[in-house]
Amino acid sequence: MRGPDGMQETLFSFTSLEQLVPGDHPLRRVKKLVDEALVGLNDLFNQIYAETGRASIAPEKLLRALLLQVFYSIRSERMLMEQMRYNMLFRWFVGVAIDDPVWDHSVFSKNRDRLLEHEVIEAFFTQLMKRAEAAGLLSKEHFSVDGTLIQAWASHKSFKPRGGGNDQTPRGPGRNAQADWKGRSRSNQTHASTTDPDARLYRKSHNTAAILAYQGHVLMENRSGLVVGSVVTCADGMGERRAALAMLDAIPNRPPRTLGADKAYDTRDFVAECRARGVTPHLARHDNGRRSAIDGRTTRHASYALSQRARKRIEEHFGWGKTVGRIRQTVYRGIKRVDQHFKLTMTASNLIRMARMLQGAPDAPIR
């Protein structure tokens, strides 16, 4: 018998958001971790917000919504608010009831900037790492480091001389005519982007084109493959090594025993700085005739081969962040905003990994 093509709505509904979300949905485990970490940020939120005045969007809901934007590759706040209006899963995760109105996208963006200004994402990341440490997921001895290129939200047409003027010759009529820079020297010392002045013209290798970009850096512990440090710097040839040393210095208590990395870190200065900190550099050696900064005294040990295998797991975070988290090309301008977006994406990647590892495990108190 063919069913009728009609819809009869009931006058009253007694369904809750909790009943609409399946009990085995992956976001349930993620939400539990997020809520536990947010409890530790209560004092920080009290400092950021005044005790009197008009109530704003709860910072806990802001942070949950930002995580959803990363998890589901939502490219703008406008689309995120549109999803919040009719997606019951999103409402449940953020903590918005079925009948509650959804915020305007401009209001959401303005309140989000307050979280970026007070570095709430870094504090949330710290609380999450306390949960991982309490569960025994973190290594305190063996780490890996690597960097990736983040394309800036700026075009080559915005890369103009710092003193003013325009050295671009259009190849045809119209506002969007292709520019011609043939025979003209262009560098970061003489030129800057008018769209994003913090972006730098950079190319990863001799076989790739130069683009306006930033560099994102990650420090990962080798036991569970969790990110324990992340930062964004201006793109240049020394940025990876400087960021690696800064993240090493930020590790509390004592420095790690080993640090795995690729050939870009195989320089005498970087090896000397690591050893001065008591860290054994397990770096991939140059094999193109260039003399390596490490020798058989380091590579002969079995731990060196283990570090070289473990360091490649950083690419899992970069791959997830570029395909799901949208960090292949950032939509933000300015190094501070790009840095916050990168850290949020790496935090979301940690959440996905921790939710799988802690599935079925007893709760460990956060100390």
Image (tube, rainbow, N blue to C red):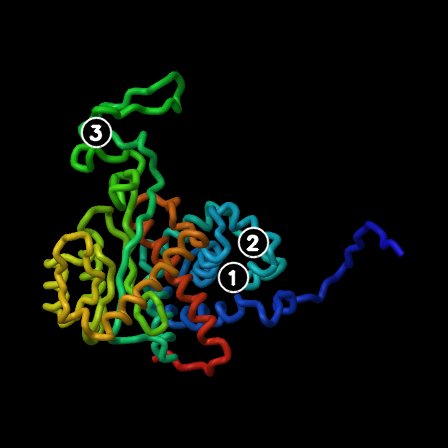
Q: Nearer the viewer, residue 230 or 220?
A: 220
Task: Using the rendered view, name the quadrant where residue 312 is placed.
Answer: bottom left
User: Residue 126's spot in the image, x, y percent?
Assistant: 33, 68
Badge 1: residue crowd in 10 Å (few <14, some 14–19, many ≥20): many
The quarter of the image holding the N terminus is bottom right
Q: Which residue is mark 3?
A: 161
- Judging depth in this view, the residue of 276 and 192 nearest the camera is 276
Q: Position of residue 258 (x, y in %)?
A: 21, 71
Query: Quick check: marks 1 and 2 in contact, CB under 8 Å?
Result: yes
Give percent across and percent down for residue 33: 45, 71
Say which amino acid is labelled 1.
Answer: Val
- Which amino acid type is marked by label 3? Pro
Residue at x 27% of width, y 69% of height: 307
Residue at 28% across / 55% down in the picture?
Answer: 147
Residue at the image position 64 percent from the left and 65 percent from the top:
20
User: Distance of mark 3 from mark 1, alpha carbons?
Assistant: 46 Å
Circles 3 and 1: CB atoms closer than 8 Å: no
On the image, which quarter does residue 300 sit in? bottom left
Mark yes or no: residue 72 visible. yes
Report, in whole angstroms, how far the alpha carbon at label 1 lies from the one at label 2.
9 Å
Residue in the picture at 53% in, 50% down: 81
Secondary structure state at the residue bearing disc 3: strand
What is the crowding at mark 3: few (fewer than 14 residues within 10 Å), some, or many (at least 20)?
A: some
Residue 94, numbered circle? 1
The answer to whether residue 56 of the structure is visible from this angle is no
Q: Amino acid at mark 2?
A: Met
Q: Secondary structure at mark 2?
A: helix
Total marks drawn?
Answer: 3
Q: Residues within 10 Å of mark 2 (few under 14, many from 20)?
A: many
Instruction: Identify the residue position indicated by label 2 in the image.
Output: 84
